[in-house]
Image (cartoon, rainbow, N blue to C red):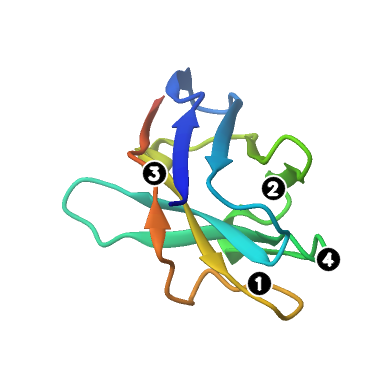
Amino acid sequence: EVQLVESGGGLVQAGGSLRLSCAASGFTVDDYVIGWFRQAPGKEREGVSCISGRDGSTKYKASVKGRFTISSDNAKKMVYLEMNSLKPEETAVYYCAYRTWYGSGCDYQWGYDYWGQGTQVTVSS
């Protein structure tokens, strides 16, 4: 079974940076996409970014484009989310999620089958 473990969250001042990591296990091929999502208190979960294990293509929510960078190391089964210029409104629990995908590209609007436990990101003003 696929398992995902996030790490790297914490407290940071507005304008600061954090690097989240997602350690994935339980699969052996690169036919997958992994997405990063976040959920703030009282708000719905939203997709932030995704990456294709097959071709490395990425996608970003418009509000994070240019500030967040998703990357992966397929050999280590790690996915990272580098977050710069963080804003207080981006305080949330950040999750990574996995789905099998045999095509190219990715979309965080798709349904995902496996989720990590989340890591808290708090951005102070």
Q: Give the number of the disc on residue 70.
A: 2
Query: On the image, numbered disc 4 is attached to which residue?
Result: 55
Comes first in the chain, label 4 or label 2: 4
| Between marks 1 and 4 in the image, the one whose residue lies nearer the viewer | 4
Q: Earlier in the sequence, mark 2 or mark 3?
A: 2
User: What residue is pinned by disc 3?
Assistant: 116
Choose between 42 and 50: the one closer to the eye.
50
Residue displayed at 56% across by 32% down: 20
* Badge 3 element: loop
| x, y percent for residue 9 | 45, 25
Residue type at numbered disc 2: Ile
Q: Position of residue 106 (x, y in %)?
A: 66, 72
Q: Earlier in the sequence, mark 4 or mark 3?
A: 4
x and y percentages locating residue 25 in the rendered image: 55, 42
Type of the residue with mark 4: Asp
Q: How far separated are the C-alphas under marks 4 and 2? A: 13 Å
Label 1 near label 2: C-beta < 8 Å?
no
Distance between the Cα atoms at labels 2 and 1?
12 Å
Q: Could you tell me which residue is drawn at 55 percent across and 57 percent down? A: 35
Check disc 1 and give the amino acid type.
Cys
The reply to whether the C-beta atoms of the residues labelled 2 and 3 are less than 8 Å apart is no
Closer to the camera: disc 1 or disc 3? 3
Left or right: 95 with respect to 78?
left
